[in-house]
Each structure stands twice: as C-alpha cells, then as structure tokens.
Amino acid sequence: MLALATYFGHVSIDSTYWYPESTPELLTDIAAAGEAYLDGGHS
C-alpha cells in the first residue's frame, strides 16, 4: 500500500485505500458523475 501511495503521490496513505477496493461499477459511476458535472448537470 505504501508503494501505491508513493506512486500516486499521495501525502497520506489514507487517500490510497479506496483504489484496491474500487470496482468497475464504482469507477463507471464516478466517470458518469464527472461527465454530468462537466456538461453542467448535477448527479
């Protein structure tokens, strides 16, 4: 976990814990929310 945190440049390892727990569904939801935000909508 420390190597992954260092690779991503995180100051705190706490910011890195969600990466191994992420799922394709979660990442899809995050991408959709980002796209909606950029398009001026809200999700």
Image (cartoon, rainbow, N blue to C red):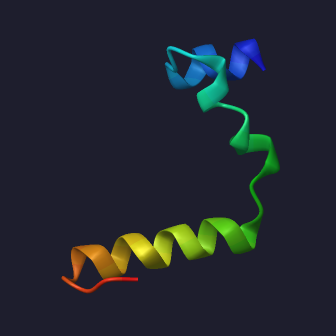
Q: Residue at horizontal 73%, vertical 34%?
A: 17
Residue 28, by quadrant, is: bottom right
The residue at 57%/16% (across/down) is 12
Q: As drawn, which residue projects farthest toward the left?
A: 40
Image position of 40 with respect to 20: above or below: below
Picture mark count: 0
Q: Position of residue 35 (x, y in %)?
A: 35, 77
Residue 12 vs 8, above or below: the answer is above
Front in this rendered view, residue 15 or 7: 15
Give the left or right position of residue 36, taking residue 33 as reference. Answer: left
Q: Quadrant of the N terminus?
A: top right
Residue 25 in the image, given as x and y percentages of width and height: 72, 74
Q: Position of residue 40 (x, y in %)?
A: 18, 82
Residue at 41 percent across and 83 percent down: it is 43
Is residue 7 rendered to the left or right of residue 21? left
Vertical relation: 1 (above or below) 39 = above
State the image coordinates of residue 14 (x, y, percent, origin top left). Answer: 65, 25
Viewer-nearest residue: 31 or 41? 41
